[in-house]
Image (cartoon, helix red, strand yellow):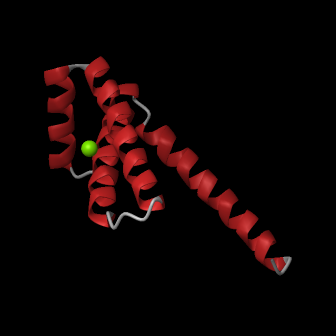
């Protein structure tokens, strides 16, 4: 959950560059994260770069939530999905896998 100050910066970015631009930036940042993950699979020691790209993607995802007015929906769905994941893990672990 972003702080009030972080939200203010994100709204300024959306206002300054527009929604289309920020959505394209999200795709660009996701691509950069993918690239770093691929590099790590090839043996690169790039944890710092992965962390940087995760931060970039998180910032852009927060803006997407603001742009789509889905902050509360995402929070609710996220909680539901995590509960379902926990149940699946409980079942998986009960089977002794
Ligand atoms: Mg980046």
78 left or right, relative to 58: right
The image quarter in which residue 65 lies: top left
Q: Quadrant of ligand 1?
A: top left
Looking at the picture, how far across and down is residue 36, in whole percent? 37, 52
Looking at the picture, tell me which residue is in the foreground, 72 or 39.
Answer: 39
Depth order, front residue of 53/8: 53
Q: Residue at 14% of width from left, 31% of height from top?
A: 12
Q: Position of residue 80 (x, y in %)?
A: 62, 52
In front: 49, or 41? 41
Find residue 86 and report its horizontal and vertical position in percent.
Answer: 67, 66
User: What residue is rendered at 22% in x and 42% in y?
Assistant: 7
Q: Could one spot residue 34 in this view of the protein?
A: yes
| Residue 1 seen in this snapshot | no
- Picture layout, residue 5 above or below residue 42: above
Where the C terminus falls, by quadrant?
bottom right
Q: Quadrant of residue 44?
A: bottom left
Please tell me which residue is depicted at 77% across the width and 77% down the height of the picture.
93
Q: Residue at x 32, y 63 (%)?
A: 46
Q: Is residue 89 left or right of residue 53?
A: right
């Amino acid at each position: 959950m972003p702080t009030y100050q972080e939200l203010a910066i994100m709204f300024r970015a959306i206002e300054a560059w527009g929604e289309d631009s920020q959505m394209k930036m999200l795709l660009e940042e996701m691509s950069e994260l993918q690239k770093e993950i691929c590099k790590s699979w090839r043996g690169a020691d790039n944890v710092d770069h992965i962390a940087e790209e995760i931060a970039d993607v998180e910032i852009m995802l927060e803006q997407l939530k603001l742009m789509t007015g889905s902050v509360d929906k995402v929070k609710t769905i996220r909680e539901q999905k995590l509960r379902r994941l926990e149940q699946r893990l409980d079942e998986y672990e009960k089977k002794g896998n």
